Amino acid sequence: MRGVAATWLGKAIAAACRLSGRGGGTALPGLLALRLCPDLDARLARGLRRGCALITGTNGKTTTAKMAATVLRSAGWRVVRNAGGSNLRRGVASALIDSASLAARVSADLGLFEADEGALPELVRVLRPRVVVLTNFFRDQLDRYGELATTAKRIARSVAEFLGPESTLILNYDDPLVASVGEGARCAVVGFGLDCPEAATDAPQRAADSKDCERCGVAYDYAQRYFAHLGDYRCPSCGRARPALDYAVRRVRTVGAEGIEVELAHSAGATTLRAPVGGVYNAYNLAAAFALCRELGIEPQEIAEGLGEFGAAFGRLERVRFAQGKTALLLLVKNPTGFNEALRLVRDCGRGCHTVIALNDGIADGRDISWIWDVELEQLVGVPASVIASGTRAEDMALRLKYAGFDPREITIENDTRRALSMALERAAPGETVYVLPTYTAMTGLRRRLEREGLVGRFWEE
């Protein structure tokens, strides 16, 4: 009865949140329901016929989860997912509550949940997932997470303790710290990565984090580096190296921000995958989604066909269309590495564009904004026709742009991000794309206003 009562309470709170316009009920229902029934999420998850899969890491969780969910649903699976991106335990509980009947029963095939890196150990303990995917570890909100090695050790301990032989751990082997998580695991471990020299870069990687060997502290040598510290690495001292890839991206072709095509080698052969999102970093998301679906038993061709129905996740290369054929492309930026990859995309396909960079310092962004000084904004100099610094810390972003080499007279400051977007659209010619690079709360705040204008859908709905 406690579980039923907690489910009813959660459903009522979710309905109240949505009716009042105060959000999608993606966190508060779970938070309060778990206080009434502390193991409600574990109880509801027992109704998932094929168990749970968790996707964690600094970047790529939401996109990878949506890719995998699209494939699984096209294959006929009923999937429960925290599509709104609420990735703490309360968010997972809210998603389960939303899918449960009034008798507190969940009838679905799989729970597919993105999980905050800090919340993953608790979720692994509670849900005992069938599959866990780790995408990457980058510096992100150091005021909340602490150093990367600390996060990785906590995750490795939980994996070793709670995942048994019936579970599978899927790791990005191109990330040395992620690869290390599998070393003490009792479960099956497989890895994905890039084996694609034409996608490598020789540019200095100022935002690289895991540059030194975890065993002996010597800097890694790279045969290929794709961005930050991701690549084919080897320690010249102790020999620690990237493990052999089970899922290897052998070819990458991008069409600006419009799309990506990769050839992925695996034990059953090779498969060509396509998705309507750009950037080399999305090759990793495709590989992670493919590996997850394959380990769940989906055939390679089914995965390729299912991805044909995929559309960008909210705020992640999401296109918003306006009058006169003008478009705003939203590229979420929340840490140096992700920001650098967004800048790389703008640099490659946005010359002459009008750009908005919105910096907030909310709890979900991280109060400490010093990380913007590790972003390689210098690569953007001379690319956009105009830059508007926006958000609660717009002045700080304008200062960073000045030191990157922008003429201060070419930088506009407008704290209100929706007004900043309007200014950029007014400057753009018919048919042009405006690039908007917001931090998390700047993005969600902008989308709420665009939603009220009928320009985008509700973020918690797929």
Image (cartoon, rainbow, N blue to C red):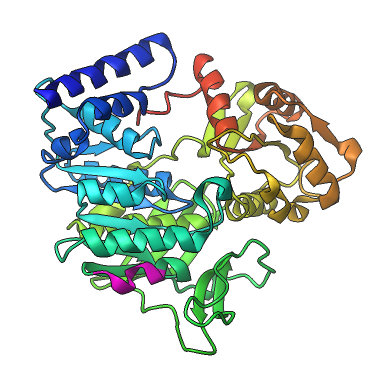
Left or right placement of residue 280 versus residue 361 in this view: left
Picture coordinates of residue 93, whole percent (x, y): 27, 33
> What residue range appears in magenta?
179-185
Q: Nearer the viewer, residue 357 or 265?
A: 357
Picture coordinates of residue 260, whole percent (x, y): 48, 54
Q: Nearer the viewer, residue 39 or 405?
A: 39
Left or right placement of residue 295 versus residue 338 in this view: left
- Residue 291 belongs to the span the image colors magenta: no
Left or right placement of residue 221 versus residue 392 in this view: left
Determine which quarter of the picture holds residue 265. bottom left
Quadrant (top left, top right, bottom left, bottom right) of the C terminus:
top left
Q: In the figure, 133 relative to 238: above or below?
A: above
Residue drawn at 33 percent across, 41 percent down: 309
Q: Nearer the viewer, residue 217 or 111?
A: 217
Determine which quarter of the picture holds residue 433. top right
- Residue 181 belongs to the span the image colors magenta: yes
Residue drawn at 14 percent across, 27 percent down: 3
Picture coordinates of residue 354, whole percent (x, y): 73, 36
Left or right placement of residue 193 versus residue 29 in this view: right
Picture coordinates of residue 151, whole percent (x, y): 44, 57
- Is residue 249 among what the camera can see? no
Quadrant (top left, top right, bottom left, bottom right) of the N terminus:
top left
